[in-house]
Image: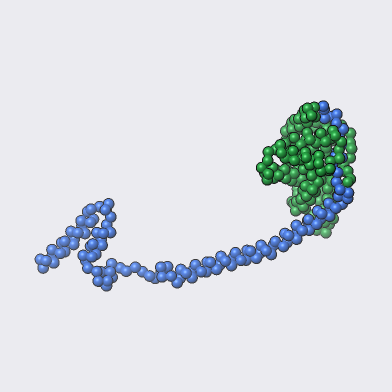
Chain colours: A blue, B green
Amino acid sequence: MKLQDIPKNDEIFSVPEGYFDALSDSIARRIRNDRHASTAKKPILKAVYRVAAAVTIAFAATAIAYRAVTPDYQSDASPLSVEEILFEQDISETELLDFYLAQTDENTDFTAEDEILFEFLDTDTEDLTD
Amino acid sequence: MKHIGSRRSQSQAESSDKPTAKSAENTNTVADERELLNRFKQEASKNQAFEQIVRKYRQRIYMHIRKMVIDHDDADDLTQEVFVKAWRNLDSFRQEAQLFTWLYRIASNECLNFLDKKRRRFLIPVYNVCKELTKKLETHGNFSGDEIQLKLQKALLRLPDKQRLVFNLRYYDELSYEEIAEITGTSKGALKASYHHAVKKIENYLTEN
């Protein structure tokens, strides 16, 4: 069977009476709703942006205040010098040596460790001879 | 129930590239379209111009959609959506294309998306969507053609959506291949091949059933 054998007819679908007049009204209504929805969205979006901005500013202010108050973040808190540790903290030279040896890594070059040790022994010997 | 469309002779489906009666009619409306678009761009006459656009194209757009989705309620919803989208985007419409091909393009995309969504929602193969639409065609009482027309529609429902779309635009809407190319974004050569294959498939179905 060939397509040409079929009489062409596009009256194949029926629609309710007066449908197309009603369709224009439905479209107009839908467009009105669409416009209303888009204009109603704008103040909501503005409010959302305002809240987001307020939260960001509050967070930044809190972070700055926290840094200013917490001692760890204070820039004027300078560490103690070696002299202060030795003379003001009442630490003996032996304790200091033990500390250095404990801190020295096993992989560290032995010459550095030996130098400290010998320096200490030399001073001790000088003290004894005096 | 009121029937829409008009009965025409069967000479229009030839696959030649000559403009058909309907496309010649479309060319005549280009000046009207420009006038409507100019009026739409002016705030004072915007609503009135759009109302005229709707009145001018509502029936053709609805019928194009109806042939694709079969069900009246679906076609009604999609037609409204097409015109809402047209309203939103008409300001940015460049007059390189004709207004009616632009509307057809929106309508065609709506149909293809609708059918795609239907398929994805139910996770059913192509055959079942075809079955569902065929059932709608037979049982909802919204088909008013004779037996051979029903058979032709059943054959059409077995085609892939895009091929069915091209067939409808060429066979029923009698658009030229240039116009269909503008609507579908497909080359003229591919459209001719698609239409030719669609006709072959339909004729095979009609012969076998």
**Residue A81 location, x and y as percent?**
30, 68
Along the viewing direction, whichever of A73 and B18 lies nearer the viewer: A73
**Residue B83 location, x and y as percent?**
78, 50
Indicate the quadrant where residue B179 lies: top right
Is residue B153 at least partly visible in the picture?
A: yes
Instruction: Check the picture and name the quadrant holding the C terminus of chain A.
Output: bottom left
Outermost residue toward the left in this view: A129
Along the viewing direction, whichever of A117 and B78 lies nearer the viewer: B78
Q: Residue at x 75, y 48 (%)?
A: B94
**B150 versus B52 height, above or below:** above
Q: Residue at x 23, y 56 (%)?
A: A113
**A51 versus B141 height, above or below:** below
**Residue A101 location, x and y as percent?**
24, 59
Indicate the quadrant where residue A71 lies: bottom left
Is residue B27 at least partly visible in the picture?
A: no
Along the viewing direction, whichever of B144 and B112 lies nearer the viewer: B144
**Residue B51 location, x and y as percent?**
84, 53
Judge from the rendering whether residue A127 lies leftward or rightward of residue B178; answer left or right.
Answer: left
Judge from the rendering whether residue B32 lies leftward or rightward of residue B68; answer left or right.
Answer: right
